[in-house]
């Protein structure tokens, strides 16, 4: 009877919050601190067969390594990256509602990096935020030698102690490996080594081998954090009647044609450091002026284009006395008070103008 | 100030547990030197991904009616930021600030949405 009452009470409680419950429903069964917060530093949990438990909702919070070093990339691929930069990354397969494939491995929240792991003794299933999935076979099979190329590729895995080693091949050549528009060929082969450091963190050491793209194998270290009290929700990419809304398919050269001739003494007033919060992320924007050209050093880098999470420097194009295009794909508008002091800058995304206050 | 921002960040990160899926670069579609203020009546709202759209009719100085399409966050991000299907609807008189498109069409993004008769800011692009 008590059990029935409890079940009924929980049902009634939940049914009163229908509109919002799945957005932030408390994750049951995870370690929590005394004040009820998820305890991300708690010890790892293990499955019945003794392996580290990887199931849960995860998000990359940092990515670094030689994957981001231009000198490791062949000339043709560097040229493609420059072309991608010059059209504000319009060719990102994600913008055409196509799968990001291996490009999602180091992707942050803004680039559909959220993913859910469902672990079974013979398979690790990865559900991605862009509604694609990976089936990582752990049933002892080996990779095929020459599989038909696909967006997500084929993956097998085995345990080496507490490390899950995932090997993948069979990728098509239509995705990018990170948000700076790094292409690859269908010779790509990827090895991921997953280690759960504690309850809240997984470190993945990723090795990329592609003799058609890299001068030598490159690697990325991706840190992922457990996303408690949240959910992976439906996100059908192309349901709008407006289509994919890339109304303007221009290039940066065209933006250059719009350049306003702003005197250097005005530009110099904007030089400084600004801070604000964009979609929950404390962001620092430092503006510098060198040889008459404005640049932005953004920390963290805008993950739509950066892929890594360190500072990223990008050129600014003045469109008016106080409005600038950034080649990173964002707009910036400086605010000047009645006394001529520059007090703030708005970082403009499709999602709106996010205010950053001047701190230095 | 820094502490305030840090606290603010922590607070907003709780409210934006999974940030928006930004679907394309701002600069690809919009002109940051073309700020717009659109005062008009909501005709329709599309709760769609990758971005939600508000369609409204405005009147220019000559009284000519103009239709505008305004791009917002995707559905999940709007819901997480507190704007839902009950927040605003057809027939409401609203004021939207944002930036116009590069191609000169009546298309804009949104930085804020205010209900004109009450002055209530229903949505704006800052953490809440």
Image (cartoon, rainbow, N blue to C red):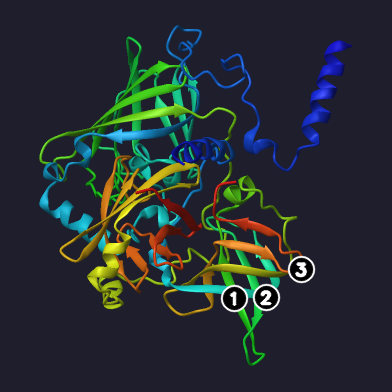
Q: Mark 1 points at which residue?
A: B68
Between marks 3 and 1 in the image, the one whose residue lies nearer the viewer? 3
The residue shown at (47%, 55%) is: A355
- In the image, taking residue B46 as reference, residue A339 lies left or right, namely left
Are the residues under badges 3 and 1 in a single subunit? yes
Callout 2: helix, strand or loop?
Answer: strand
Q: Mark 2 points at which residue?
A: B40
Q: State how far apart marks 3 and 2 are (Cα).
A: 12 Å
Which chain letter matches label 3?
B
**Residue B65: percent from the left, percent from the top?**
66, 85
Give the mark nearer the N terminus: 3 vs 2. Answer: 2
Are the residues under badges 3 and 2 in a single subunit? yes
Which chain letter matches label 1?
B
Disc ID at residue A20 = none
In front of the other: A155 or A99: A99
Q: How many marks?
A: 3
- In the image, taking residue A320 as reference, residue A72 lies left or right, namely left
Give the mark nearer the N terminus: 1 vs 2. Answer: 2
Q: Name the residue under label 3.
A: B117
**Residue A325: percent from the left, percent from the top?**
34, 65
Task: Give the residue at the far right of this rendering.
Answer: A1
Callout 3: helix, strand or loop?
Answer: loop
The residue shown at (43%, 57%) is: A344
Q: State how far apart marks 3 and 1 are (Cα).
A: 20 Å
Residue A142 visible at all:
yes
Q: Are marks 1 and 2 in contact (CB under 8 Å)?
A: yes
């Amino acid at each position: 009877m008590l059990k029935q009452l409890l079940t009924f009470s929980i049902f009634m409680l939940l049914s009163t919050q229908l509109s919002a419950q799945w957005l932030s429903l408390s994750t049951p069964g995870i370690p929590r601190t005394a004040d009820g917060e998820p305890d991300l530093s708690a010890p790892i949990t293990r499955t019945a067969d003794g392996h580290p438990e990887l199931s849960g909702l995860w998000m990359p919070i940092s990515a670094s390594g030689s994957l981001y070093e231009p000198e490791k990339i062949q000339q043709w691929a560097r040229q493609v990256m420059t072309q991608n930069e010059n059209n504000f990354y319009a060719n990102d397969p994600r913008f055409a509602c196509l799968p990001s494939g291996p490009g999602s491995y180091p992707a942050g929240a803004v680039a559909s990096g959220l993913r859910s792991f469902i672990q079974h003794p013979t398979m690790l299933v990865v559900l991605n935020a862009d509604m694609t999935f990976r089936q990582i076979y752990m049933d002892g099979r080996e990779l095929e030698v020459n599989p038909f190329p696909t967006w997500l590729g084929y993956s097998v895995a085995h345990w080496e102690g507490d490390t899950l080693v995932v090997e993948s091949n069979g990728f098509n050549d239509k995705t990018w490996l990170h948000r700076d528009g790094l292409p690859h060929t269908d010779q790509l082969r990827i090895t991921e080594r997953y280690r759960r450091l504690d309850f809240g963190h997984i470190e993945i050491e990723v090795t990329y081998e592609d003799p058609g793209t890299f001068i030598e194998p490159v690697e990325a270290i991706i840190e992922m954090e457990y996303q408690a009290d949240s959910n992976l929700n439906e996100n059908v990419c192309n349901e709008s009647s407006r289509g994919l809304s890339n109304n303007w398919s221009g290039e940066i050269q065209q933006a250059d044609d719009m350049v306003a001739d702003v005197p250097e003494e005005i530009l110099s007033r904007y030089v400084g450091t600004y801070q604000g919060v964009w979609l929950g992320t404390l962001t620092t924007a430092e503006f510098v002026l060198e040889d008459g050209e404005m640049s932005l050093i953004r920390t963290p880098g805008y993950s739509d284009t950066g892929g890594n999470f360190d500072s990223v420097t990008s050129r600014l194009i003045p469109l008016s006395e106080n409005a600038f295009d950034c080649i990173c794909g964002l707009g910036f508008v400086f605010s000047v008070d009645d006394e001529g002091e520059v007090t703030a800058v708005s970082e403009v995304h499709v999602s709106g103008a996010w205010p950053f206050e001047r701190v230095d | 100030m820094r502490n305030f921002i840090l606290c603010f960040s922590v607070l907003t990160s709780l409210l934006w547990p999974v940030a928006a899926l930004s679907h394309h670069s701002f600069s690809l579609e919009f002109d940051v030197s073309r700020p717009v203020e659109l005062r008009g009546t909501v005709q329709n709202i599309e709760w769609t991904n990758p971005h939600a759209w508000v369609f409204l009719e405005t009147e220019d100085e000559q009284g000519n009616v103009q239709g505008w399409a305004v791009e917002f966050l995707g559905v999940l991000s709007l819901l997480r930021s507190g704007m839902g299907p009950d927040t605003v609807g057809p027939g409401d008189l609203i004021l939207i600030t944002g930036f116009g498109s590069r191609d000169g069409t009546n298309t804009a993004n949104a930085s804020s949405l205010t209900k004109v008769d009450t002055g209530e800011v229903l949505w704006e692009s800052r953490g809440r």
